[in-house]
Image (cartoon, helix red, strand yellow):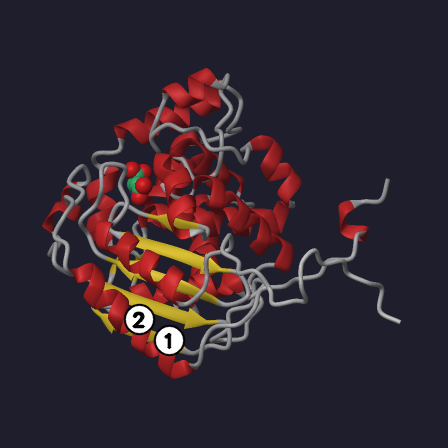
Amino acid sequence: MAELDDIPQHVSTGTLPGWDAVENLVREAHAYARETGDGDIATYIPRLAQVDPELFGVSVAEVDGAVHAAGDAEVLFSIQSISKAFVYALVCEELGHEVVRERIGVDNTGLPFNSVIAIELADGHPGNPMVNAGAIATTALVPAASADERWARIQAGLSAFAGRRLELDGEVYTSEADTNQRNRAIGTLLQAYGRIEADPLGAVDAYTRQCSLLVTATDLAVMGATLADGGVNPVTGERVVAADVARDTLAVLAAAGLYERSGEWLFEIGLPGKSGVAGGIMTVSPGKAGIGVFAPRLDGAGNSVRGRLATRYLARALGLDIFASEAREHGPYPYSREKPS
Ligand code: GLU
């Protein structure tokens, strides 16, 4: 049987509405979602509890590099779990997706992001790279001779997705490092199961750093647009990962990007996305655009409430939902398609 790579691939995605329409719809999505004050900010990382809960930014980056933003789209916040998507992509780029698929997995666990039971139930298998176990195991796979080199590669890789150098928020990092006993336990448990070969606490530290990188809603939109554009950053023109790595990353996000509400998100919004507990969500419309939102108040699973509403508005109004279709106009029914002469 032919290898998957030998089957010709055709990509079909459609296009976004014109520039003015996108610009207006981004503003409308912001105004629409700002009406709710539902949700609570994350407090389990003490530094995150100090954020202004009213901050709210929305940004769309098109695959031609155009950026449309509304509200607090240039305010910095920590990327948190959204970093998992990009470290996964970088590791796939280095090691190949089959290695990562076998070692980490691609299925939703259906359990919270920091679940230990999920690891135990799966005999030590991390499940997928979007839960903490899988993310820590993925970070441990970043090829590097030292902790410094690993961190430098992660920082440089995520910066390439964003198209600018991303910096660490030292206060968020210290605050999480002081309180992440659970993640350290997960790292050590993975080592006991042979899923992390060496230095699990070093991997947890690199993971904690990657979560503390500062981004804006517009950065998330550009990072998403890079995944939407076959792995090429549409603002800088740099190829960051191969097209099939971008595709594989989106498939994992569709299954597991929104914590244990990933199925609800896919049903409601119809696009792969990834959220983080500081209130960011990055969503990707393959071949069209990336959407970045930031609003710190979260639902019970850890997803930004305003961010979800704004993204839902845009997915619908911009025609991005991958499951939506319209019947085509064609001759009277019953219709039989004839071979063109
Ligand atoms: N650094 C956070 C943790 O591991 C990330 C949580 C998240 O955004 O889901 O707890």
| Residue on which the image places disc 2 | 26
Question: Height in image: 133 above or below 238?
Answer: above
Query: Residue 143 shows which numbered tag?
Result: none
- Decide if residue 226 is in sight here: yes
Question: Height in image: 160 above or below 235?
Answer: above
Is the C-beta of the residue carrying label 1 under 8 Å from the nearest atom of ligand 1? no
Residue at (41, 82) in percent of width and height: 19
Counting from the top left corner in percent of width and height, residue 249 is at: 53, 49
- Decide if residue 167 is in sight here: no
Residue at (33, 54) in percent of width and height: 281
Query: Which quarter of the figure has residue 183?
Result: top left
Q: Amino acid at mark 1?
A: Val
| Residue on which the image places disc 1 | 22
- Helix, strand or loop status at disc 1: helix
Q: Nearer the viewer, residue 312 or 120?
A: 312
Q: Nearer the viewer, residue 225 or 134?
A: 225
Residue at mark 1 to residue at mark 2: CA–CA distance: 6 Å
Labels 1 & 2 near each other (Cβ < 8 A): yes
Crowding around mark 2 (Cα neighbors within 10 Å: few <14, some 14 to 19, many 20+) is many
Q: Nearer the viewer, residue 13 or 231?
A: 13
Residue at the bottom extreme, as displayed: 20
Query: Which quarter of the figure has residue 143?
Result: top right
Q: Amino acid at mark 2?
A: Val
Residue at the right extreme, as displayed: 341
- Helix, strand or loop status at disc 2: helix
Counting from the top left corner in percent of width and height, residue 109 is at: 44, 28
